[in-house]
């Protein structure tokens, strides 16, 4: 959690511990009206050489957004989240979301901060590298 007041450059936050479930993935697919079988069917995922059903990349971006929102705790809002996916994450496996404040600055009359983010899989490897821009409340 960030300290009271403005976040300081270099400040670290997290981890937010999550276990994306198959149910979450199925609901996400339904909301997107996209149903690639390797997201929800174990046999289809294995037939394509995957070790199990996968967590969709855009769902992981949503989890990054959620983490930033929780860390802000009402002290601002998320303007942008971007992510580079490095390796797949499997459903029903733990992940951790961590971050740090890379920069605090003024832009267009607003106080902003850039966050560097990562999704870390159960082996301790980053599966997603992310970046967020937040606008801080006065």
Image (cartoon, grey):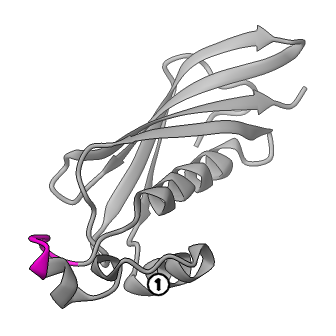
User: Relative to residue 5, is residue 46 depicted above or below?
Assistant: below
The picture places residue 76, in percent across and down from the top left corner, at 79, 38
The picture places residue 111, in percent across and down from the top left corner, at 80, 18
Task: Give the residue drawn at x 73%, y 21%.
Answer: 112
- Horizontal side of 23 relative to 115 (left or right) equals left
User: Relative to residue 57, is residue 119 depicted above or below?
Assistant: above
Label 1 belongs to which residue? 26
- Horizontal side of 124 relative to 80 (left or right) equals left
The picture places residue 24, in percent across and down from the top left corner, at 49, 80
130 and 2: which one is in front? 130
The picture places residue 80, in percent across and down from the top left corner, at 66, 36
User: Relative to residue 129, is residue 64 depicted above or below?
Assistant: below
Report the span colored magenta: 47-52
Viewport quadrant of the N terminus: top right
Judge whether residue 37 is colored magenta. Answer: no
26 and 92: which one is in front? 26
Q: Quadrant for residue 40, please give it.
A: bottom left
Q: Which SS class for mark 1?
A: helix
Viewport quadrant of the C terminus: top right
């Amino acid at each position: 959690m960030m300290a009271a007041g403005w976040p300081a450059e270099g400040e670290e936050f997290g981890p937010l511990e999550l276990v994306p479930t198959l149910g979450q993935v199925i609901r996400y697919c339904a909301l997107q009206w996209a149903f690639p079988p390797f997201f929800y069917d174990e046999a289809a995922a294995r037939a394509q050489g995957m070790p199990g059903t996968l967590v969709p990349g855009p769902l992981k971006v949503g989890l990054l957004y959620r983490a930033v929102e929780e860390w802000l705790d009402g002290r601002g809002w998320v303007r942008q989240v971007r992510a580079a996916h490095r390796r797949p994450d499997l459903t029903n496996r733990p992940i951790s979301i961590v971050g740090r404040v890379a920069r605090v600055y003024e832009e267009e009359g607003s106080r902003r901060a850039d966050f560097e983010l990562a999704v870390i899989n159960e082996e301790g490897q980053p599966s997603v590298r992310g970046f967020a821009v937040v606008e801080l409340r006065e």
